[in-house]
Image (cartoon, grey):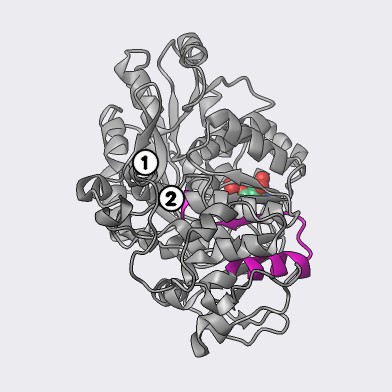
Amino acid sequence: MADTQVTFADLGLSDEVVSAVVTSGYTKPTPIQEKAIPYVLMGRDVLGCAQTGTGKTASFTLPMIDILSAGRAKARMPRSLIIAPTRELAAQVSENFVKYGQNTRLSMALLIGGVSMGDQEAKLDRGVDVLIATPGRLLDHFERGRILLTDVKILVIDEADRMLDMGFIPDVERIVSLLPTIRQTLFFSATMAPEIKRLADKFLMNPKEVSVDAPASAAENVAQHLVRCSVKDKRDALRSLLKSETVDSALIFCNRKRDIGVLHRSLQRYGIEAVQLHGDMSQPARTETLAKFKAGEARLVICSDVAARGIDIKGLSHVFNFDVPSHAEDYVHRIGRTGRAGLSGRAFTLATPEDSKLLSAVERLIGMKIPVIQLDGAAPAAAESRPAETVELASETNPPRKTGRGRGARSNDNAVAADEQSAPPPAKSSRRSSRKRGEHSEKPAVAVEPAVVAEVQEAKPRETSLTGGGVVEAFPTQRAGSGNGRGRGGRDREDNGRSVTGFGDEVPAFLLKAVPKKATG
Ligand code: AMP
């Protein structure tokens, strides 16, 4: 954090709040806190451009506690509202209020999905000073007539760029339309894309702009590395990194949810324990996984962007991008999970030749080339300079394959099959053997049971969102409209817009091939 002589007390915070901050172990404000807190205390609107990891949550919670400590909440009429894109982020904000508000008597309610509506309603009925919510659940309570937003004096929109990304902006606009026009608004976003700026202009009145780090700049204390490999060698490369690095705790990001399960099983086969975190999991399961990880009971989490967004994990040593993110900004968020609160961190990105466009987008955004590293014995950038089939990472941790099928005979998209062949015991050998030898053309070639095709062709949502009283599956609009199973911005890019076969969590990924309708009979 910044070397500043300014203290929390200098910022104008009350003794109660300062003492709670000091009890939390923080001695100096971070730059965003130093810049934002005085304006928030003045009652100004603030447009904050800051990533998570900069201490931005406290930059609004601390002054809010002081502002709200004068006054009382009325039943069902919260005095302040914080909207966050994910349940985890909302929960983290509420933890901040508990921690920093320990010397005050503010009441708070957290409205997120996956938690009983009844308990939330009971809290609302008693009256809350601080309401923290995800957009869907908040509107749900509103529509049931359980809440009135006309007494909200302070609105915080946290992680606005993520709201945009997750398709929540219409909900946010609706929520803001239900609030009094005279209010204080604090708007935070890691990036200031034109669409975000448009929203800020709409929601804020004469805001003070505070910014730390250039927008979308990657955290400085994260050492970034790029590992070039072919698709089929990604798992080898990851295991090799897990072995060679001193990994205390790490997030491993995959672009697609189904790959999380595949990678999880693959690591397990090699005796590497990991847990999964993604938007399809129930809220209790997500919370439990996160708690385990935060408590140090799990060392590795394989996760999707939505589940891991903004998550604050103390001392996370590593971030692995098993996939180059489809959205360049996600790279900044992912690696920003490590190197937090002044600690250093390490980030590794596995890039295949097919990822070149995505990688360029990331490098353009962060304004630098990610330094390429070579895994022991592997040629640097080998995947680009040689046919993918011939690239071997020397760090193979398991006995040589004895399948009679040379690695060269495998196509890129049977990487998991290859992975499983080398790991005892081979799981789906009967299915694998049904595949013809040497099939590695781009053409759809796999015939599987029609029922299976139907299961996967039924487009799965990219992530869940909250509305209508529970967790429902949300499709980004473009995806729903297109009907081709592709997510916004080509997140499901490997599907190539074609139908894809698979067995859900049970199938090796090499069967995940495009199948023409005829081939399934
Ligand atoms: P945030 O950006 O709000 O997600 O915060 C990132 C991390 O920084 C959290 O673990 C906070 O507890 C921590 N933090 C917040 N304020 C400070 C501070 N003034 N000094 C050191 N760490 C802080």
Q: Is residue 328 left or right of residue 477?
A: right
Crowd rating for badge 1 (residues with CA inside 10 Å; few <14, some 14–19, many 20+): few
Residue 274 percent coordinates (x, y): 69, 49
Q: Residue at x 49, y 61 (%)?
A: 510
- Circle number at residue 161: none
Q: Is residue 427 left or right of residue 365?
A: right
Residue range in magenta is: 234-257
At label 2, which amino acid type do we have? Gly
Q: Residue at x 71, y 34 (%)?
A: 20
**Disc 1 C-beta below 8 A from ligand 1:** no
At label 1, which amino acid type do we have? Ala
Q: Is residue 282 left or right of residue 292?
A: left
Q: Residue furthest bottom?
A: 385
Q: What residue is pinned by disc 1?
A: 451
**Label located before the other in sequence (1 or 2):** 1
Please name whichever residue, 212 or 493, is drawn nearer the observer in this view of the structure.
493
Vertical order, 81 against 424 (above or below): above
Please name whichever residue, 92 or 416, is drawn nearer the observer in this view of the structure.
416
Vertical order, 145 against 136 (above or below): above
Q: Residue at x 37, y 43 (%)?
A: 460
Q: SS of the residue at dot 1?
A: helix
| Image quadrant where residue 14 sits | top right
Residue 106 percent coordinates (x, y): 58, 21
Residue 102 percent coordinates (x, y): 68, 27
Tell me if residue 472 is in the magenta stretch: no
Q: What residue is pinned by disc 2?
A: 502
